[in-house]
Amino acid sequence: MKPVFKLATAAALALALAPYDASAQKVTLNVATAGDQNMVDYIKDYLGPMFEKSNANVTVKAVGTGPGDAGSQKIAEKLDAQKSQASWDVDVAVVHQKMAGDMVKAGLLAPYTKDIASGKLTTSESSKNALGANVQGYVIPMFQSQTAIAYNPALVKNPPKTYADIEAWSKANPKQFGYNGIKGGMSGVSFVVGWVYANAPNPEQLTNGPYDAKVAANWDPALAKLKEFNKTATITPGNAGTLDMLNRGEIAMGPVWVDMFYSWIADGKLPPTTKLSLIGPGMPGQPMYYVIPAKAANMDAAKKFVELATSPAVQAEGIVKKFNWYPGIDAQHVKSQLDDATWNKLFVDVTPADLQSKGKSFPIKEYFDDILQSYEKKVMN
């Protein structure tokens, strides 16, 4: 959701995460993170120095493996390649939701959350379920990222509250609603998935299972309606492209990542009057997870690091204030650490109640793939 950087090569990753020599007095805590450059910077410039200050014998080394699921895949592949070794040279990892379940099933992760204080502070569904996979005990969300509809209130007097409202509004205001399809970023993917949830029968099965390949045929009416909707919509060039077109007045409304939205507001790249609405029946968001490899060379230090990273104070200062993300632990544990202005800024348009009732998870992996393939075949063609 921020500017991307190049994927690390396998050779560079291996070099960056050189194993710690157990005979040395000092500990090098290797933290590998998927995601954009801001993820690496957060650990290198904020979390790492904070942890080192209270743990004088530890040096935190952060390495990025690249944006998107490919970055998480690199971490999984590295751990899998070391399975036969007594210890592994990744101590903490930050991975996407889609990969976490596979890593648990493959035995690559340690069930660590019971051993740290902050493990008791997260009860969200995403801390237990990752696209249909049981990850309880193995993950704590670093943050909760959510999509919502951004709109210009000068042009949208009565903002839509549901997908049906958006459909009607776009028909009456052609080319004023913009989203980036499924190729240009996950805000568009989220909009498409939410459309299927809103228009397909039994949407709960898509998130809870069981998987049935025949279910995809039930989406044909919803996808036909989406293809017709696209005739009145504007397809934007990406997550940032939607925000940029909003800023220039080329569109009046579109789905965005909430953290990107507030960062653009803070940077003066979007008018401060622009507002957000989380429409019903809901739109998906996704966390990134802190995980600890099953054979981390520095297991105790790894647990202490995640405990710090997921503490209420750090979640408030680092996650909410610095990056405009929703906290990974339950919001009520973070509220007391925040001033009213910060809390109200993040939760004024999209309230905790909105997140509870309309913040959806993405479908289980098989349905997720089916939705994207169906969009390509039945909406884009």
Image (spheres, rainbow, N blue to C red):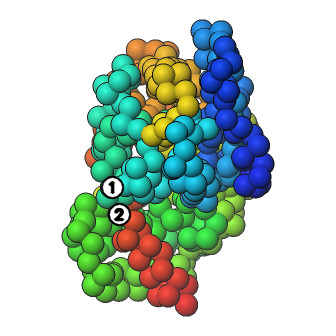
Residue found at x 47% / y 61%: 190
Instruction: Please name the amino acid that badge 2 sits on.
Output: Ile
Depth check: give the residue in front, 53 or 200. Answer: 53
Which residue is pictured at 61% across the width and 71% down the height?
A: 183
Whether residue 173 is situated above or below residue 269 in the rendered picture = below
In the image: residue 174, left or right of residue 310: right
The quarter holding residue 59 reads top right
Mark 2 or mark 1, which is nearer the start of the sequence? 1
Please provide percent x and percent y for residue 135.
34, 46
Q: Residue 87: tell me if it is visible.
A: yes
Q: Secondary structure at mark 2?
A: loop
Residue 2 in percent (x, y) is at 68, 47
Instruction: For marks 1 and 2, give the CA distance.
Output: 8 Å
CB under 8 Å between callouts 1 and 2? yes
Tally of numbered discs: 2
- The amino acid sitting under disc 1 is Ala
Would residue 158 be found to the left or right of residue 174 on screen?
left
Residue 113 located left or right of residue 108: left
**Where residue 19 sits: x, y (%)?**
67, 35
Which residue in the structure is indicated by mark 2?
364
Q: Nearer the viewer, residue 272 or 308?
A: 308
**Residue 218: image x %, image y %?**
28, 83
Q: Which residue is mark 1?
A: 133
Element under disc 1: strand
- Packing grade of label 2 (10 A; few <14, some 14-19, many >=20) is many
Q: Residues within 10 Å of mark 1 (few under 14, many from 20)?
A: some
Q: Nearer the viewer, mark 1 or mark 2?
A: 1
